[in-house]
Structure formats: C-alpha cells, structure tokens
Amino acid sequence: MTGRSIMTDLHAAPGQDRPARNEFAEVLDFVIRRWLRHPGALAWTLAGVSVATVADVVTPLLAGWMVDDVSRAAGGGVATPSMEAARRGVLWLVGGLVLLGLLGVAGRRMSYLGITHLTARTMRGIAESAFARVQRFSTDWHGNNFAGSTVRRLTRGMWATDTLADTLMLMLLPSVLVLAATTVVLAAHWPSMGLLLGVSAILLVVMSTALTLRYVAPSARLANRWDTRMGAALADAVTCNSVVKAFGAERREDAHLSRILARWQVRTERSWIRGTNSGNLQNLAALVMRVLLIGAVLALWWRGRAGPGDVAYVLTMVFLVQGYLRDIGQQISMVQRSVNEMEELVAIYRLPLGVADRPAAGTLRVTHGAIRFDRVGFGYRAQARPLFHDLSIDIPAGSRVALVGPSGSGKTTLIKLLQRLYDVTSGQILIDGIDIATVTQESLRSQIAIVQQEPVLFHRSLAENIAYGRPGASMADIEEAARQANAAGFIDRLPKGYATMVGERGVKLSGGERQRVAIARAFLANAPILIFDEATSSLDSESEILVQDAMERLMVGRTVLVIAHRLSTVVGLDRILVFAHGTLLEDGSHTDLVTHEGGLYRRLFELQSLDG
C-alpha cells in the first residue's frame, strides 16, 4: 500500500459526515474502494468469473441439443443423410462440451489467481492503514481501550475481508450471472418459464436477504461484541500476569474469564442457530422453486410444446441453478457475517484522530531549543474546571529546569502538551519561536528525547531498542550510546550481548537496566530538547548512581526538563518551577526557593529531608 493511500485513510473516514449510518452499505463501500486500488487483479478476477459462468450457462443448451440429435440418430436400419448429420452433430457437441469444460477450468483458475492477489493486497493495505490510524489516535483513546480488543478488531476485520471477497466474487456474483442468463434463455423460448424462474429467483434472494439482515445479523453483531470483550479480557490477564502471580489470583482470573466466556457462548450459539434456521428455510424455498420448474417443463412436454431435448435442457439447467441457489442463502449469511466482523474495524476510520496535523503543517528543526508557554489554557474533558489558565513560562535554550509539585499539580500534563499529545485550548507553545501546532507531530517529537519513569522496551533485541532513537544507526554508534549510558557493562555480560531479546515491555531486565537502555536510546536520538520523567524514582541506590551519572552526560548542551518528586535530584539544576493545581507558584533556583519562608518548595524539601 502506498504512503498516499495510508494518508488518505488517515484523513478520510467513510460515512463520518452522514447523519444516519447503514453499516452494511458502509462496509461494502469501504471494501469496494480498496478493491478499486488494484484494478489489474480485480479485472482478472472478474474476467475469470465471467468465462466460467458463461461456460456453465451454455453447457445445458448443448446437452439439450445433444439429446435431440441422439433421438434423431437412433432410428435403426439403414442410415439416412439426416441420421448421419445428427451423428456428426453429436460428435461436434461432445467436442463443444469438452471445450466448455476446459473454459470453465481456465476461468476458475483465472478467478482464483486474481482474487488471491486482490485479497492479499487489500488485506495488507487495510492492516497498514488501520495500524497507522490507531498509532495516531490520541493518548486518551489508547488509555480508554484495551490493547487486546484493539488487536482483535483489526485482525478479525482483516480476515473478514478475505471471506467477503471470496463470497461476493466467487460465489454470489456467479450465482447472479447464472440466474440472469438462464432466465433470459428460458424467456426467449418460453416466456412463461422465464417469468417463473425470474420471479422465483427474486423472491428467494429477497427472502434470503431479509432473513440474513433482520434475523441473523443482530445476533451476529452482539456475538462479535462479546468476542471483542473476550479478547480484551485475555490480553488484560496475560499482560498483568505478574500481578496475578503476586496475589495468587490464577483461579480468580480463571473465574473472571469463565463468566465472560459463558456470555460469549450463549450469544455465539444463538447466532449460529439463527444462521442454521435461516439456511433451512432458504433450502426449502429452493426446493419449491425446483419442483415448480420441473413441473412446468413437463406440462409443456405433455402438451407437445417441448421435445426431449427441451426437457433435458430444463432438467440440466434446474440442477445447475440448484447448485448455485442451494448455497445462496448461506452465502448471503457469510456476507453479512463478514460485514458484522468488519464493522468494528471500519468504525475505527470514523473516529477522529484527536490530535491531528494541520493540512499545511511544516517540519520543525530546532536550532537552539528555547521553549515558551504563551498564555496557555488547558483542561481534561473529565474535569469540570481547566487545569491551566493563562500559563506563561519562558525556558531559555540550554537551560536545565525542574518541574516540582504534588501529584496532580500539572507537571506531567505540561510535558504532554509540549509533546503535543494534547492540544492546548488557548494560547500557544513555541519552540525557537515556532508554534508547535503548525508543524507535524512526527518532526516535533523527533526533536524531543524523553526518558520515562517506567521505560517501555519492545520485545526485540537490545541493539534494536537502543537504535529506536535513530533508525539505521551503526553498531558502533549503538555501542557508544550504551557506553555513555553506563549500559555497556551489563550488556557485555549477557550471553548474546546486544542480540539479547528483552521480553515484552523489557521484563527480562531490571528497572535500572531498562532505564539505562532508555538513556542510551536518548543519547542516540541526540535531540536538542531532553525530558526526564521521574527517571530515578524507582531505582536502588547503585542503579541510581549509574543512571544519574549517565543523565549528567546526556544533559550537556541540551534544553532539559526534569519532572521530579525526589527533590535531592534537582538541587543542582539551573531553575526549579513549583506547581500546585495547575498554577505556577514559585520559580527560582534551589538556593532561592529553599530560603523562601512559607514556600511550597521549602516545605516539600524539609518533609523529604525528615523522611530521609
């Protein structure tokens, strides 16, 4: 899938401007638009289906003509010119049937090859664009959605695309073409027979569609919701397995999942039973249509209006149509099931990104690193009153600034606003005089390196995790960054060194080791603005010394913001900003603030000194 296609999917959500949505039509529109991005594979598939269908429709005609010729050639006695002609005709018709059989095989192979390429490319494109969209959703969205349920929505919807393509183009489309063609052929010979087939087929399709949409679909949609909940519960328990083990809560989690599975089972069984009931009714209706058609041609034969070849043609045609119609109800059910399974995936494209780049957003290149919060206002949706109101702060380039205050005072929110994980509601944030809302988020965040309190690592090698700060970095650069971060020592002691896999979220490493890997990643990123978010708060004394030493080296020549609860770690910084309830109460060096009678910083510092 091209980058342009992904960006189109990021900014254009199908159906988002419609006041009322039709999920079925919306999903079909979603899939068809993606099929049209691969016109070659789509055309090859449709051509193969058309060739195979034409071969199927013409086969009963040739069979009927063969019966007529066989009847004329079976007179016995001396052969007459008409008998010889009939026998030659039979041979030609046998050749024609063989040719039609070969065309049918070739057409189906064309369609299978075509749809293989079409479906694989479509699924890849959907997976790429959906993943890209989810990656760009706001921090709030990710905080409110289980990772497991999100993955389930994407994978289930992606594989439903495969079922939908097979059913629509390899099953339903040939059925419609066969019904239309045989109706035309019958109507040309016997208008009443053509009318009977046409009306019967339409009634059968309408009944199948109504049963599927009104009877089967609602239960299937509910079953899918519980399937998503099941995936979320599984992922939540597996991700938090260390907590489960810590409290010996395996049986408790078993029971929790069992309750969800019981609800899932009831709804899934009801969905399947309704599908079975719908299929039985449709098969009964197809049997009635078949009996009517056979009875009608026999009545014509009884009155001398149809010969043996006509009867043979109709019988062959009826069994051909029966083969297509026998499963048409099931196919419609499969289409609806696929649509149901894609609804949650398609819904992702309707959701706003939360924080989106402006259409003409530029690229930020920081030359100095001066930061300015200019009359900034911001509040979380769940809060009745805004956190920040007319907040203004100037941070000169190259300065080292600590953000201090009780929990909930706004320190972390300030950092998230600087990263533009949220948009300010008023005012602006400037870096080197450039409003960060006017540049791309990617370029903004590439200029900011952050070392978090609980650094998250990918389940990849140590080298890959360090190189995440600068894709394409050489091994020498990776090793130098590890050395600067005091991480080279423990990495060299590992059996596989830099090739060691760190486990999900880095669970195979200690807290101090993860922290030093995160600092090595920041060294390699070499960003002009650096953020430490409680980087040493959960470390033992030995690890803290190593991390502090690495932090000191990393701060050199950069604009640094440090969020800290342990005030002993910020004593040597240039400046300390003290917050409470979103208000900047104090601003100065440690020496200035600790001598401020009644000041919040002094009170916090004294409390921590007593605790020590």
Image (spheres, grey):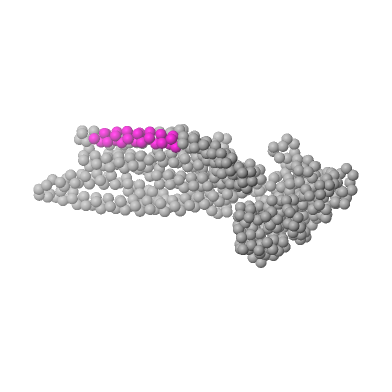
Task: From the viewer's side, name the closer residue of 470 and 545.
Answer: 545
Residue 278 sits inside the magenta stretch: yes
Q: Looking at the image, which residue is at 66% across and 50% down?
A: 360
Q: Which residue extends farthest front? A: 248
The mark total stands at: 0
Indicate the quadrant where residue 488 lies: bottom right
Indicate the quadrant where residue 583 lies: top right
Q: Looking at the image, which residue is at 36% across and 51% down?
A: 107
Q: Looking at the image, which residue is at 58% across and 49% down?
A: 131
Task: From the viewer's side, name the closer residue of 511 and 293.
Answer: 511
Q: What secondary structure prevails in the magenta region? A: helix
Q: Is residue 346 left or right of residue 283?
A: right
The location of residue 485, given as percent across then percent down, is 72, 60
Residue 417 sits inside the magenta stretch: no
The location of residue 80, given as percent across then percent down, is 12, 49
Task: From the viewer's side, name the closer residue of 379 and 178.
Answer: 379
Q: What stretch is highlighted in magenta?
A: 272-298
Is 316 above or below relative to 100?
A: above
Residue 612 visible, this angle:
yes
Q: Looking at the image, which residue is at 24% across and 51% down?
A: 94
Is 488 above or below relative to 451?
A: below
